[in-house]
Image (spheres, rainbow, N blue to C red):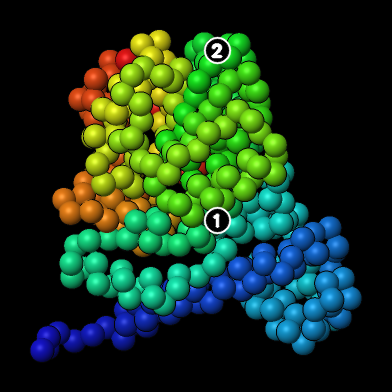
Protein backbone atom coordinates (compact mmCIF):
# COMPACT_ATOMS: atom_id res chain seq x y z
CA UNK A 1 0.00 0.00 0.00
CA UNK A 2 1.23 3.50 -0.84
CA UNK A 3 1.60 5.52 2.39
CA UNK A 4 2.12 8.83 0.55
CA UNK A 5 -0.34 11.41 1.83
CA UNK A 6 -2.93 12.49 -0.69
CA UNK A 7 -3.37 16.21 -1.27
CA UNK A 8 -7.15 16.77 -0.79
CA UNK A 9 -7.25 19.52 -3.41
CA UNK A 10 -5.35 17.42 -5.93
CA UNK A 11 -7.73 14.53 -5.20
CA UNK A 12 -10.73 16.75 -5.85
CA UNK A 13 -9.27 18.00 -9.13
CA UNK A 14 -8.43 14.48 -10.31
CA UNK A 15 -11.85 13.17 -9.29
CA UNK A 16 -13.56 16.03 -11.11
CA UNK A 17 -11.51 15.29 -14.21
CA UNK A 18 -12.60 11.64 -14.18
CA UNK A 19 -16.27 12.49 -13.61
CA UNK A 20 -16.13 15.08 -16.38
CA UNK A 21 -15.54 12.21 -18.82
CA UNK A 22 -18.64 10.48 -17.50
CA UNK A 23 -20.49 13.73 -18.11
CA UNK A 24 -19.07 13.70 -21.63
CA UNK A 25 -20.50 10.22 -22.14
CA UNK A 26 -23.95 11.41 -21.09
CA UNK A 27 -23.77 14.57 -23.21
CA UNK A 28 -22.65 12.43 -26.17
CA UNK A 29 -25.78 10.32 -25.80
CA UNK A 30 -27.94 13.47 -25.67
CA UNK A 31 -26.27 14.81 -28.83
CA UNK A 32 -26.98 11.49 -30.54
CA UNK A 33 -30.64 11.69 -29.53
CA UNK A 34 -30.88 15.31 -30.65
CA UNK A 35 -29.44 14.40 -34.02
CA UNK A 36 -31.50 11.23 -34.38
CA UNK A 37 -34.78 12.94 -33.48
CA UNK A 38 -34.14 16.01 -35.63
CA UNK A 39 -34.14 18.35 -32.64
CA UNK A 40 -31.20 20.46 -33.75
CA UNK A 41 -32.76 20.94 -37.18
CA UNK A 42 -36.01 21.95 -35.50
CA UNK A 43 -34.15 24.46 -33.31
CA UNK A 44 -32.14 25.89 -36.21
CA UNK A 45 -33.31 29.44 -36.89
CA UNK A 46 -36.21 29.12 -34.44
CA UNK A 47 -34.88 31.63 -31.92
CA UNK A 48 -35.58 31.14 -28.22
CA UNK A 49 -38.41 28.63 -27.82
CA UNK A 50 -40.03 26.59 -25.04
CA UNK A 51 -40.30 22.83 -24.76
CA UNK A 52 -44.01 23.16 -25.61
CA UNK A 53 -43.17 25.00 -28.83
CA UNK A 54 -40.53 22.41 -29.72
CA UNK A 55 -43.06 19.65 -29.01
CA UNK A 56 -45.49 21.32 -31.41
CA UNK A 57 -42.78 21.51 -34.11
CA UNK A 58 -41.61 17.91 -33.71
CA UNK A 59 -44.60 15.92 -32.46
CA UNK A 60 -42.57 14.72 -29.47
CA UNK A 61 -43.51 14.78 -25.79
CA UNK A 62 -42.99 18.09 -23.99
CA UNK A 63 -41.72 16.66 -20.68
CA UNK A 64 -38.98 14.65 -22.40
CA UNK A 65 -38.00 17.63 -24.49
CA UNK A 66 -37.77 19.91 -21.46
CA UNK A 67 -35.31 17.58 -19.73
CA UNK A 68 -33.25 17.28 -22.92
CA UNK A 69 -33.26 21.05 -23.47
CA UNK A 70 -32.14 21.76 -19.92
CA UNK A 71 -29.34 19.22 -20.27
CA UNK A 72 -28.19 20.84 -23.51
CA UNK A 73 -28.20 24.25 -21.84
CA UNK A 74 -26.22 22.82 -18.92
CA UNK A 75 -23.68 21.56 -21.46
CA UNK A 76 -23.54 25.08 -22.93
CA UNK A 77 -24.76 23.78 -26.30
CA UNK A 78 -27.96 25.83 -26.11
CA UNK A 79 -28.47 29.35 -24.81
CA UNK A 80 -30.91 29.62 -21.90
CA UNK A 81 -33.40 32.50 -21.70
CA UNK A 82 -35.89 33.48 -18.99
CA UNK A 83 -39.18 31.65 -19.13
CA UNK A 84 -37.54 28.27 -19.82
CA UNK A 85 -36.76 29.23 -23.40
CA UNK A 86 -33.82 27.69 -25.26
CA UNK A 87 -31.94 28.80 -28.36
CA UNK A 88 -29.50 27.07 -30.69
CA UNK A 89 -26.85 29.67 -31.58
CA UNK A 90 -25.87 30.12 -35.22
CA UNK A 91 -22.51 28.43 -34.63
CA UNK A 92 -24.36 25.56 -32.95
CA UNK A 93 -26.48 25.14 -36.06
CA UNK A 94 -23.33 24.84 -38.18
CA UNK A 95 -21.91 22.12 -35.92
CA UNK A 96 -25.08 20.22 -34.99
CA UNK A 97 -27.72 20.80 -37.69
CA UNK A 98 -26.27 21.79 -41.07
CA UNK A 99 -25.04 18.41 -42.33
CA UNK A 100 -25.08 19.24 -46.03
CA UNK A 101 -23.76 22.78 -45.93
CA UNK A 102 -21.21 23.06 -43.13
CA UNK A 103 -17.63 21.84 -42.96
CA UNK A 104 -17.94 22.08 -39.17
CA UNK A 105 -20.83 19.58 -38.89
CA UNK A 106 -20.04 17.10 -36.12
CA UNK A 107 -23.29 15.56 -34.89
CA UNK A 108 -22.81 12.56 -37.18
CA UNK A 109 -19.83 11.48 -35.09
CA UNK A 110 -22.27 10.72 -32.26
CA UNK A 111 -24.52 8.43 -34.32
CA UNK A 112 -24.72 5.33 -32.20
CA UNK A 113 -22.96 4.16 -29.06
CA UNK A 114 -20.56 1.19 -28.89
CA UNK A 115 -22.65 -1.95 -28.27
CA UNK A 116 -21.85 -3.91 -25.06
CA UNK A 117 -20.90 -7.00 -27.06
CA UNK A 118 -18.28 -4.98 -28.94
CA UNK A 119 -16.85 -3.72 -25.64
CA UNK A 120 -16.61 -7.35 -24.48
CA UNK A 121 -14.69 -8.28 -27.63
CA UNK A 122 -12.35 -5.30 -27.22
CA UNK A 123 -11.61 -6.39 -23.64
CA UNK A 124 -10.78 -9.86 -24.93
CA UNK A 125 -8.49 -8.31 -27.57
CA UNK A 126 -6.29 -6.98 -24.76
CA UNK A 127 -5.73 -10.63 -23.79
CA UNK A 128 -5.39 -12.22 -27.23
CA UNK A 129 -3.81 -9.33 -29.14
CA UNK A 130 -6.28 -9.85 -32.00
CA UNK A 131 -8.62 -6.94 -32.67
CA UNK A 132 -11.88 -6.41 -34.53
CA UNK A 133 -12.12 -5.67 -38.24
CA UNK A 134 -14.58 -3.11 -39.54
CA UNK A 135 -16.72 -6.01 -40.70
CA UNK A 136 -16.76 -7.25 -37.09
CA UNK A 137 -17.85 -3.80 -35.89
CA UNK A 138 -21.11 -4.09 -37.85
CA UNK A 139 -23.05 -1.81 -40.21
CA UNK A 140 -23.16 1.14 -37.82
CA UNK A 141 -19.39 1.59 -38.07
CA UNK A 142 -19.62 2.39 -41.79
CA UNK A 143 -22.58 4.71 -41.21
CA UNK A 144 -20.91 6.62 -38.37
CA UNK A 145 -17.63 6.99 -40.28
CA UNK A 146 -19.51 8.28 -43.31
CA UNK A 147 -21.42 10.89 -41.32
CA UNK A 148 -18.30 11.94 -39.44
CA UNK A 149 -16.06 12.37 -42.50
CA UNK A 150 -18.63 12.99 -45.21
CA UNK A 151 -19.24 16.76 -44.93
CA UNK A 152 -15.60 17.68 -45.57
CA UNK A 153 -15.26 15.19 -48.43
CA UNK A 154 -18.44 16.29 -50.18
CA UNK A 155 -17.57 19.97 -49.93
CA UNK A 156 -13.82 19.92 -50.61
CA UNK A 157 -12.71 16.86 -52.60
CA UNK A 158 -13.86 17.79 -56.11
CA UNK A 159 -13.72 21.63 -55.94
CA UNK A 160 -10.41 22.05 -54.12
CA UNK A 161 -8.43 18.92 -53.35
CA UNK A 162 -8.35 17.05 -56.67
CA UNK A 163 -7.53 20.25 -58.65
CA UNK A 164 -4.39 20.64 -56.51
CA UNK A 165 -3.06 17.39 -58.02
CA UNK A 166 -1.25 18.34 -61.24
CA UNK A 167 -3.02 17.04 -64.35
CA UNK A 168 -5.59 14.88 -62.56
CA UNK A 169 -8.71 16.88 -63.39
CA UNK A 170 -7.90 16.91 -67.12
CA UNK A 171 -7.51 13.12 -67.12
CA UNK A 172 -10.74 12.53 -65.23
CA UNK A 173 -12.71 14.90 -67.44
CA UNK A 174 -11.40 13.22 -70.60
CA UNK A 175 -12.07 9.72 -69.33
CA UNK A 176 -9.83 7.77 -66.96
CA UNK A 177 -9.99 4.90 -64.50
CA UNK A 178 -9.94 5.76 -60.80
CA UNK A 179 -10.10 3.76 -57.59
CA UNK A 180 -11.00 4.34 -53.95
CA UNK A 181 -9.29 1.76 -51.74
CA UNK A 182 -11.04 1.56 -48.38
CA UNK A 183 -14.06 3.31 -49.85
CA UNK A 184 -16.36 2.67 -46.89
CA UNK A 185 -19.88 3.89 -47.60
CA UNK A 186 -18.68 5.57 -50.80
CA UNK A 187 -18.78 9.30 -50.03
CA UNK A 188 -15.58 10.12 -51.94
CA UNK A 189 -16.18 7.48 -54.59
CA UNK A 190 -19.65 8.80 -55.41
CA UNK A 191 -18.50 12.43 -55.37
CA UNK A 192 -15.89 11.60 -58.01
CA UNK A 193 -18.25 9.46 -60.10
CA UNK A 194 -20.85 12.25 -60.20
CA UNK A 195 -18.29 14.95 -61.01
CA UNK A 196 -16.49 13.00 -63.73
CA UNK A 197 -19.06 10.94 -65.67
CA UNK A 198 -16.58 10.13 -68.47
CA UNK A 199 -14.39 8.21 -66.03
CA UNK A 200 -14.91 4.84 -64.37
CA UNK A 201 -14.35 4.37 -60.64
CA UNK A 202 -13.71 1.20 -58.66
CA UNK A 203 -14.43 0.98 -54.94
CA UNK A 204 -12.68 -1.56 -52.72
CA UNK A 205 -13.49 -2.32 -49.09
CA UNK A 206 -13.15 -5.56 -47.09
CA UNK A 207 -16.34 -4.79 -45.15
CA UNK A 208 -19.48 -6.21 -46.71
CA UNK A 209 -21.49 -3.76 -44.60
CA UNK A 210 -19.67 -0.81 -46.19
CA UNK A 211 -19.99 -2.11 -49.74
CA UNK A 212 -23.70 -2.85 -49.25
CA UNK A 213 -24.25 0.73 -48.09
CA UNK A 214 -22.25 2.09 -51.00
CA UNK A 215 -24.13 -0.11 -53.48
CA UNK A 216 -27.50 1.16 -52.23
CA UNK A 217 -26.45 4.76 -52.84
CA UNK A 218 -24.94 4.03 -56.25
CA UNK A 219 -28.15 2.31 -57.31
CA UNK A 220 -30.34 5.12 -55.96
CA UNK A 221 -28.32 7.71 -57.90
CA UNK A 222 -28.34 5.64 -61.09
CA UNK A 223 -24.55 5.82 -61.48
CA UNK A 224 -23.29 3.52 -64.20
CA UNK A 225 -19.59 4.36 -63.90
CA UNK A 226 -18.97 2.68 -60.52
CA UNK A 227 -17.85 -0.89 -59.80
CA UNK A 228 -17.63 -2.24 -56.27
CA UNK A 229 -15.51 -5.02 -54.78
CA UNK A 230 -15.65 -6.62 -51.35
CA UNK A 231 -11.88 -6.77 -51.12
CA UNK A 232 -8.89 -5.11 -49.51
CA UNK A 233 -6.10 -3.24 -51.18
CA UNK A 234 -4.08 -6.41 -51.64
CA UNK A 235 -6.60 -7.48 -54.30
CA UNK A 236 -5.96 -4.69 -56.81
CA UNK A 237 -5.15 -5.61 -60.43
CA UNK A 238 -1.55 -6.72 -60.90
CA UNK A 239 -1.24 -4.78 -64.15
CA UNK A 240 -1.13 -0.94 -64.33
CA UNK A 241 -4.81 0.01 -64.43
CA UNK A 242 -5.51 3.22 -62.55
CA UNK A 243 -4.86 6.82 -63.50
CA UNK A 244 -5.92 8.12 -60.09
CA UNK A 245 -6.28 6.28 -56.80
CA UNK A 246 -7.23 7.47 -53.31
CA UNK A 247 -6.93 6.02 -49.81
CA UNK A 248 -8.77 8.16 -47.27
CA UNK A 249 -8.16 7.59 -43.56
CA UNK A 250 -7.56 3.88 -44.00
CA UNK A 251 -3.87 3.01 -44.41
CA UNK A 252 -3.49 3.16 -40.63
CA UNK A 253 -6.41 0.68 -40.30
CA UNK A 254 -4.78 -2.02 -42.44
CA UNK A 255 -3.18 -5.19 -41.12
CA UNK A 256 -0.69 -5.29 -44.02
CA UNK A 257 -0.19 -1.67 -45.14
CA UNK A 258 3.20 -2.38 -46.75
CA UNK A 259 1.61 -5.09 -48.91
CA UNK A 260 -1.21 -2.75 -49.89
CA UNK A 261 1.24 0.00 -50.84
CA UNK A 262 3.12 -2.47 -53.06
CA UNK A 263 -0.20 -3.53 -54.57
CA UNK A 264 -1.10 0.11 -55.28
CA UNK A 265 2.27 0.62 -56.96
CA UNK A 266 1.57 -2.30 -59.28
CA UNK A 267 -1.98 -1.17 -60.09
CA UNK A 268 -1.14 2.50 -60.72
CA UNK A 269 -0.07 3.61 -64.19
CA UNK A 270 3.39 5.13 -64.54
CA UNK A 271 1.87 8.58 -64.99
CA UNK A 272 -0.78 7.97 -62.34
CA UNK A 273 -1.38 9.76 -59.03
CA UNK A 274 -2.11 8.32 -55.60
CA UNK A 275 -3.78 10.68 -53.10
CA UNK A 276 -3.51 9.70 -49.45
CA UNK A 277 -5.54 11.34 -46.70
CA UNK A 278 -4.56 10.45 -43.15
CA UNK A 279 -4.70 11.78 -39.61
CA UNK A 280 -2.53 14.74 -38.61
CA UNK A 281 0.10 13.42 -36.23
CA UNK A 282 3.76 13.59 -35.29
CA UNK A 283 6.23 10.76 -34.58
CA UNK A 284 6.85 11.98 -31.03
CA UNK A 285 4.02 11.44 -28.55
CA UNK A 286 5.07 14.59 -26.67
CA UNK A 287 4.42 16.67 -29.79
CA UNK A 288 1.01 15.05 -30.24
CA UNK A 289 0.13 15.98 -26.66
CA UNK A 290 -0.36 19.53 -27.91
CA UNK A 291 -3.54 18.34 -29.66
CA UNK A 292 -6.49 19.08 -27.32
CA UNK A 293 -8.45 16.19 -28.86
CA UNK A 294 -5.66 13.63 -28.58
CA UNK A 295 -7.45 11.44 -26.03
CA UNK A 296 -10.38 11.11 -28.45
CA UNK A 297 -8.06 9.93 -31.21
CA UNK A 298 -6.59 7.26 -28.96
CA UNK A 299 -10.12 6.18 -28.12
CA UNK A 300 -10.86 5.85 -31.83
CA UNK A 301 -7.65 3.87 -32.20
CA UNK A 302 -8.33 1.29 -29.50
CA UNK A 303 -11.99 0.87 -30.47
CA UNK A 304 -11.60 0.89 -34.26
CA UNK A 305 -8.38 1.86 -36.06
CA UNK A 306 -5.66 -0.03 -34.18
CA UNK A 307 -8.17 -2.78 -33.50
CA UNK A 308 -8.67 -3.22 -37.25
CA UNK A 309 -4.91 -3.02 -37.89
CA UNK A 310 -4.42 -5.89 -35.41
CA UNK A 311 -7.42 -7.97 -36.53
CA UNK A 312 -5.10 -10.59 -38.04
CA UNK A 313 -2.07 -12.26 -36.45
CA UNK A 314 1.09 -10.16 -36.84
CA UNK A 315 -0.91 -7.16 -38.06
CA UNK A 316 1.02 -3.90 -38.41
CA UNK A 317 -1.09 -2.15 -35.77
CA UNK A 318 -0.33 1.40 -36.92
CA UNK A 319 -3.47 2.84 -35.34
CA UNK A 320 -5.10 6.24 -35.73
CA UNK A 321 -1.93 8.29 -35.23
CA UNK A 322 0.56 5.81 -36.69
CA UNK A 323 0.76 7.00 -40.31
CA UNK A 324 2.44 10.34 -39.71
CA UNK A 325 4.23 12.20 -42.54
CA UNK A 326 7.60 10.57 -41.83
CA UNK A 327 6.10 7.07 -41.82
CA UNK A 328 4.05 7.84 -44.93
CA UNK A 329 7.06 9.05 -46.89
CA UNK A 330 9.24 6.12 -45.80
CA UNK A 331 6.62 3.45 -46.53
CA UNK A 332 5.67 4.84 -49.94
CA UNK A 333 9.36 5.04 -50.89
CA UNK A 334 9.91 1.45 -49.77
CA UNK A 335 6.85 0.49 -51.81
CA UNK A 336 8.39 1.75 -55.03
CA UNK A 337 7.20 5.36 -55.23
CA UNK A 338 9.69 8.13 -55.97
CA UNK A 339 7.67 11.34 -55.55
CA UNK A 340 6.01 12.43 -52.32
CA UNK A 341 4.41 15.82 -51.68
CA UNK A 342 2.44 16.85 -48.60
CA UNK A 343 -0.61 19.13 -48.93
CA UNK A 344 -2.38 20.99 -46.15
CA UNK A 345 -5.95 21.95 -47.06
CA UNK A 346 -6.79 23.33 -43.61
CA UNK A 347 -8.56 20.09 -42.78
CA UNK A 348 -8.49 20.17 -38.97
CA UNK A 349 -7.91 16.42 -38.62
CA UNK A 350 -6.06 15.31 -41.74
CA UNK A 351 -3.06 15.87 -43.97
CA UNK A 352 -2.93 14.90 -47.65
CA UNK A 353 -0.07 13.29 -49.54
CA UNK A 354 0.32 13.30 -53.33
CA UNK A 355 2.35 10.23 -54.30
CA UNK A 356 3.58 9.29 -57.77
CA UNK A 357 5.76 6.49 -59.22
Q: Is residue 44 above or below residue 78?
A: above
Quarter of the picture holding the N terminus: bottom left
Q: Is residue 5 above or below residue 94?
A: below
Q: Is residue 326 above or below residue 74?
A: above
Please give left or right for residue 330 compared with residue 93 in the image. left
**Alpha-carbon distance for marks 1 and 2?**
31 Å
x then y, percent, for residue 294: 38, 55
Circle 1 SS class: helix
Query: Which residue is at 21% across, 49% downward?
Result: 315
Residue pointed to by mark 1 = 143
Could you say which is closer to the camera, residue 164 or residue 119? 119
Could you say which is closer to the camera, residue 14 or residue 313? 313
Disc nearer the start of the sequence (1/2) = 1
Please give left or right for residue 151 compared with residue 70 in the image. left
Query: Which residue is at 23% across, 25% downward?
Result: 335
Residue pointed to by mark 2 = 171
Q: Quadrant of residue 111?
A: bottom right
x then y, percent, for residue 280: 39, 41
Could you say which is closer to the camera, residue 175 or residue 71? 175
Instruction: Please rate how many residues cluster around mark 1, counting C-alpha atoms within 10 Å: few if below 14, some from 14 to 19, many from 20.
Output: some
x then y, percent, for residue 79: 73, 68
x then y, percent, for residue 98: 72, 51
Circle 2 SS class: helix
Q: Quadrant of residue 195?
A: top right
Quarter of the picture holding the C terminus: top left
Query: Which residue is at 65% across, 23% downward?
Result: 197
Query: Which residue is at 42% across, 15% downward?
Result: 272
Instruction: Please rate how many residues cluster around mark 2, counting C-alpha atoms within 10 Å: few if below 14, some from 14 to 19, many from 20.
Output: some
Q: Which mark is residue 183?
A: none
- Can the viewer see residue 329? no
- Can the viewer see residue 221? yes
Amino acid sequence: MNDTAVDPDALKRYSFSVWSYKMGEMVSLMIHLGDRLGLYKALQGAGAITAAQLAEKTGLKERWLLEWLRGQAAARLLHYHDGDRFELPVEGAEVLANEEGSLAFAAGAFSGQTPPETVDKLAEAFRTGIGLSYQDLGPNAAHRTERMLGPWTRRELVPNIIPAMDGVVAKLEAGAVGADVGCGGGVALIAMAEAFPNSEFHGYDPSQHAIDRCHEKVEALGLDNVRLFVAGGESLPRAPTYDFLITFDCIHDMTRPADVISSIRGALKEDGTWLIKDIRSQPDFKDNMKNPLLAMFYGFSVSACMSSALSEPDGAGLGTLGFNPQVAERMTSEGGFSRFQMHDFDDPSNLYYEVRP
